[in-house]
Image: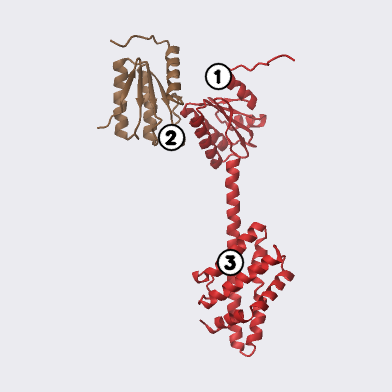
Chain colours: A brown, B red
Amino acid sequence: MDRIPILRMGEYLLVTIQVDMHDQLALTLQDDLTAAVQRVGAKGVLIDISALEMVDSFIGRMIANLSRMSRILDARTVVVGMRPAVAITLVELGLSLAGVDTALDVERGMRRLRASVEESGASIVDLDD
Amino acid sequence: MTPENTAVVDLLAAQQEQILREWLAEVATTGRSAGGAAGAKAEAEALLNALHDDLRAGAEASKTDAPAWARTHAVLEALSAARAAQGASAGETSHFVLALKKPMFTGLQQRLASHPALLWSAVMAVSTLVDGLAQWTASTYQRSREEVIARQQEELLELSTPVVKLWDGVLAVPMIGTLDSNRTQIVMESLLQRIVETGSELAIIDITGVPTVDTLVAQHLLKTVTAIRLMGADCIISGIRPQIAQTIVHLGVDLEGVTTKATLADALALAFKRSGLVVARAKTA
C-alpha cells in the first residue's frame, strides 16, 4: 500500500505530500506521523503540500488535525507551499485552518519552524543516539 | 415554388435596379440613415441579390428562421453587426429592412395589376417575408450589442484589478469600485498567483476606492485574507475611510486577526518595519 514518507532532519520531521491524497492515505499518514513524532521526540514538523492539487473537506481537516496532534505531542508544525487553488477551495469550504502555521516555501518554513521552536524554549538535544 | 414566390423572384430579377433606387430613396426620406450612402447601397444590393437567390432556391417566405435563408441571414448579420459597431439604434437598423416593403409593393402592383388574386397573395408573402427579416435583423443586432457589452464588462473586470509590486516581497492591490463575488474571486486568484510567482510574504489590499462595505463585501475580504494566510503570506487591509470603519463596527463584522491600516502609506511603513527596513533621509537640506 502507498505510504507518504516521513523524513527526519535532526530534530525536525519533513513530510512531503507528492501525490493526491485519498482518505486512507491521509489516515495512514496521521498514524505514521504521530508515531514518528513520539518516537523521535521531534520538536518541529514541516508539511510540504506544494504538489497537492486537489483537496476536499476531509483532507483539509486532516491537515489541520495533523498540526494539532503534533502540537499536543510538543512539536510545532508549519504547512508550506499551499497552491492558490487549494487555498481558495479551503476558504470556500469554510476551513480557515485556525492555529495552523503556514509559510510560502520550504526554506521560509524551516526558518519559521526554528524561530518558533526557539521561542518555545525547547532545548536542543542530540538525537543521534 | 408557389406562384406568388415565382412572381416575387421575377420581380427581383427584372426590376432590381428600380427597386434598389426606390428603396434607398425610401430609407433616405423616412429614416435617419446611419452610414454613408455608398455603404447603404452596397448593403441593399447584396441583400436583394441574396433574397433573389434564396427565393429561387425554394426558401419559404413564412419561415425566415429556416436554414434555406442562409445567404440572406449572412448579409443581414454583417449589416446588423456593422450598424451595431457604428452605434445605430435597433430601430434604425430594422427600419432599413422594413423600407424594402414599399418599393416591392409598387413593383408587384405594376407587374400584376391584371391578376388581383395573385397580386394579393404576393403582397402578403412579401409583407410576411420582410417583417420576418426585419425581426431577425433586430434580434441579431441586439445580440451583437450584447456581445459588445459582455466583452467590455470582461475587460473592465481585468483592468480594475491590477496586482502591483510595491517593494521586494510586498504586493499591493488597489481595489476600485464595488466589490462583488465575481470581482473578489478574480482579485483573490490573481493576487494568490502573484504571491506564488514572486514569493512575496506580504500583500496589501487597499480599499480606498471601494465606495461601500457591507457584510458581503466584508466577508469577501475576510475570505481573501484567510486564503493568503493559508498560503503562508500575510495580509494588511489599508485605505479604510472613517465612514467605512463606522459601518464595519455597526454591522458587527469581526475583523479581529486582520491587520488594518488607515492609508496605504501606513501599511507600507508596517511592511518595512516587519522586514527590518529603515527609511532615512539621505542628507538634511
Q: Which residue is mark 2?
A: A86
Q: Earlier in the sequence, mark 3 or mark 1?
A: 3
Q: Which residue is mark 3?
A: B75
Chain of the residue that carries numbered disc 3 in the rendered image: B
Q: Amino acid at mark 1?
A: Ser
Q: Position of residue B270 (x, y in %)?
A: 59, 21
Do callouts 1 and 2 point to residues on the same chain? no
In this rendered view, identify the residue nearer to me: B241 or B77.
Answer: B77
Task: Tell me if B42 is positioned left or right of A81 in this view.
Answer: right
Q: Amino acid at mark 2?
A: Val
Disc number lying in front (1 or 2) = 1
Q: Amino acid at mark 3?
A: Val
Task: State whether residue B61 appears in this view.
Answer: no
Residue ID at (63%, 83%): B108
How dense is the environment of label 3, judged by Cα within 10 Å: few (below 14), some, or many (20 and up)? many
Looking at the image, the residue that sits furthest to the left is: A1
- CB under 8 Å between discs 1 and 2: no
Chain of the residue that carries numbered disc 1 in the rendered image: B
Q: Which residue is mark 1?
A: B275
